[in-house]
Structure formats: C-alpha cells, structure tokens
Amino acid sequence: MSDLALFLVRIGFLAVMWFFVFSIISVIRADLFGQKIFSKVAAANAPKVVSSPIAASSPVGEPKGATKLVVTEGVRKGLEIALRGRELTIGRSEDSDLIVDDEFASTYHAKLVLLNGEWMLQDLNSTNGTYLDGVKVTTPTTLKLKSTVRVGKTSFELRA
C-alpha cells in the first residue's frame, strides 16, 4: 500500500473514532442535563405532545371518575397526587409532577393529559418505555381506573 493510501486510511479511522466519541458525549450530556440534542431532522420526527383543545372550565372536559394518581410500587410507594390540572408530567426532572427517582426512567418520560374527560397516557420517546398493564405504550392511550402504569421500577394507577 502506498504512503498516501495509508495516510488516508489513518485519517478516515481517526474521523470515525472522533464521531463515536462525540456521539457518546452527546448521549451522556442529554442524560445528565435533561436536554436532548436533536438535529433539525430528528426534531421534526419527534413525537407530538397531545394537548386538550377543550377549555379548562368546560364541563365536557371534566374527568370521568379519576381524581388522584396513587403510586403502588417503587421508592414513592403510597404517594397520592390529586388530578387537578389538564396535564401531569412524569420523569426524573425536578419540574415533573411525579418525580421518578429511578435510573430506568428518562428525564421527561411520560405525560398524562386530560382529553374529552378521559386521561390519556403518552410516552415521550423514553429510552426504556412506558407500560400500561404490561403492554408497552407506543401511541397515546386512554387510561382506565386502576390500570397499572409502569415507568422504570415505579408503578402507579388512577383512582376515584
């Protein structure tokens, strides 16, 4: 092999190695600081957040029975959160409504949204997934009373 070809192979190998190093740094940074680093293409393909088009004072949008969220397994077992708002966020982030202190939960893991009087569960593109009664949630799904939702090692359910 000529010296020029060997030099170009070394440069190519070095470029690939640095690409992997920066990819690893990006993943670690996103995990530590809760900010995912997206390209414009990835941001366009990110899941859309479901929001309720009904005004908060509308009687049509009132919940049908569910008044609280109860943690049934995990570090915060026994915690009850009143369902007063239109949304409830779940994740490791300090600004989440239900903080899940678990290495298997993402910073912004899932969201509950009140839509047409029913609570919908939406996974926010989490790494390890959100499970409803043992089935992985891939699209926004209606939650029924006493259905078990699992985020990492934490489980919770809606109750009246």
Image (tube, rainbow, N blue to C red):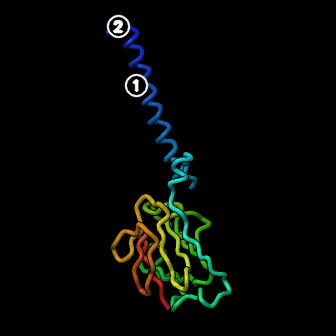
From the viewer's perspective, tell me whether residue 134 is left or right of residue 34.
Answer: left
- Percent across and percent down for residue 10 are 40, 19
Q: Are marks 2 and 1 in contact (CB under 8 Å)?
A: no
Secondary structure found at label 1 = helix
Quarter of the image with the N terminus in it: top left
What residue is shown with label 1? 13
- Percent across and percent down for residue 51 are 58, 72
Give the residue drawn at x 45%, y 81%.
143
- Percent across and percent down for residue 47 are 50, 61
For mark 2, does the 10 Å Cα neighbourhood hold few (<14), some (14 to 19), or many (20 or more) residues? few
Secondary structure found at label 2 = loop
- Percent across and percent down for residue 73 are 41, 77
Give the residue drawn at x 46%, y 42%.
24
Q: Is residue 36 above or below residue 116?
A: above
Q: Which mark is residue 2?
A: 2
Give the residue drawn at x 44%, y 20%.
11
- Dot 2 or dot 1: first in sequence order is 2
Q: Which mark is residue 107?
A: none
Seen as rendered, the residue at the extreme left is 1
